[in-house]
Image: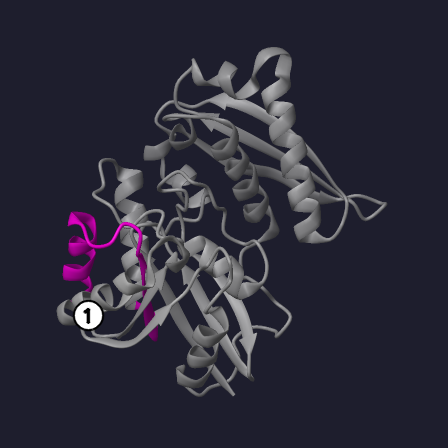
Amino acid sequence: MRCGFVALIGAPNAGKSTLLNQMVGAKLSIVSSKTQTTRMRILGIVMHQQSQILLIDTPGIFKPKRRLDELMVSNAWNGAVDSDITLFILDVHKGLNEEIYLIINKLKDITRRIWLVLNKIDKIVPQKLLPLTQQVNQLLPIERNFMVSAKKGSGINDLLDALAQDIPEGLWLYPKDDLTNLPDRLLAAEIVREQIFMLTHEEIPYAVTVETESFKERKDHSIRIDLVIYVSKPNYKPIIIGFQGRKIRMIGERSRKEISRLLERSCHIFITVKERKGWDRENNRLKAIGLDLS
């Protein structure tokens, strides 16, 4: 038996969350085309060849501008330090840039094992993959190299096989049927936030947070979930609600279907929208979205 922690580190939009979901076989981490979607560390539990692989999806690493950003980046690096193996996820379509060099320089200070995962290989001609691999290996002590397409699933089994064989020997830390250690109420809030990312534009998705106020099982075994969307500016509230409430109804309906599928039972979603200026500086709000403040 083997069990070990594996951190997914990379720039925003490198495909870390997509890779986590693909490896786990379930949607645990929200995904969008917008950068900085993931705010907290999310644990995905994979059983593979009698090994329990504990995948830590981390926020994309970028230059922080506010306290929320600083905590996101700090949580990402803590995930790498605490792991047995760090997967450095690199978007091959973007290649090496200033953002990537900053991450590489930081990774040099980490004594843990580093594996390079070239992602989105379906978006680049194969002839460019080897030179890019060589460039990164010259800059970092890479232990192993992998080429995958997280979206299409190619190369995933090879990566899982290698992780299952190389993580430390030890007893499993979670029941073998578990997919994550996140509470259902936090997953529900994240799914609602994902719909906000998908259905709103510009700075609005970054100016909101979602909290689950109540999560109760009803007599018919369905779940009633009451959630609050906090917006940082008063003019964002009508945008989230939409004309005659159409936008908030769409957010609620899409979220209900996704949460019901994930929890494998009927769910009833009730969402309110409130203005809360400066929520991204409040410790209680930051803790509620799963960030470690220490």
**Residue nearest the viewer, comparing 202 with 224:** 202
For residue 102, side relative to residue 43 (left or right): left
Q: Is residue 144 above or below residue 120?
A: below
Q: Residue at x 68, y 34 (%)?
A: 269
Q: Is residue 86 above or below residue 62?
A: below
Scheme by which the image is coloured: one colour
Task: State which quadrant residue 178 falls in.
Answer: bottom right
Local crowd size for mark 1, using a 10 Å CA cut-off: few (<14), some (14–19), many (≥20): few
Say whether residue 274 is magenta. Answer: no
Apparent side of residue 221 relative to residue 126 in the rendered image (left or right): right
**Which of the 4 image quarters holds residue 69?**
top left
Q: Which residue is mark 1?
A: 134
Q: Is residue 88 above or below residue 271?
A: below
How many numbered marks are there?
A: 1
Which residue is painted at 50% across and 17% down in the image?
239
Q: Amino acid at mark 1?
A: Gln
Q: Measuring 44% from the left and 88% from the top, which residue is drawn there?
A: 169
Along the line of sight, which residue is nearer the eye, 242 or 185? Answer: 242
Q: Is residue 90 magenta?
A: yes
- How far from the left and from the top, in percent, is residue 115? 30, 72
Farthest residue, direction right? 220
Q: Position of residue 274 (x, y in %)?
A: 51, 22
Where in the figure is residue 208, as x and y percent of width and height?
A: 43, 30
The magenta region covers 82-109
Q: Secondary structure at mark 1?
A: helix
At 25% across and 35% down in the image, what residue appears? 66
Is residue 14 rendered to the left or right of residue 177?
left
On the picture, is 42 further left or further right than 70? right
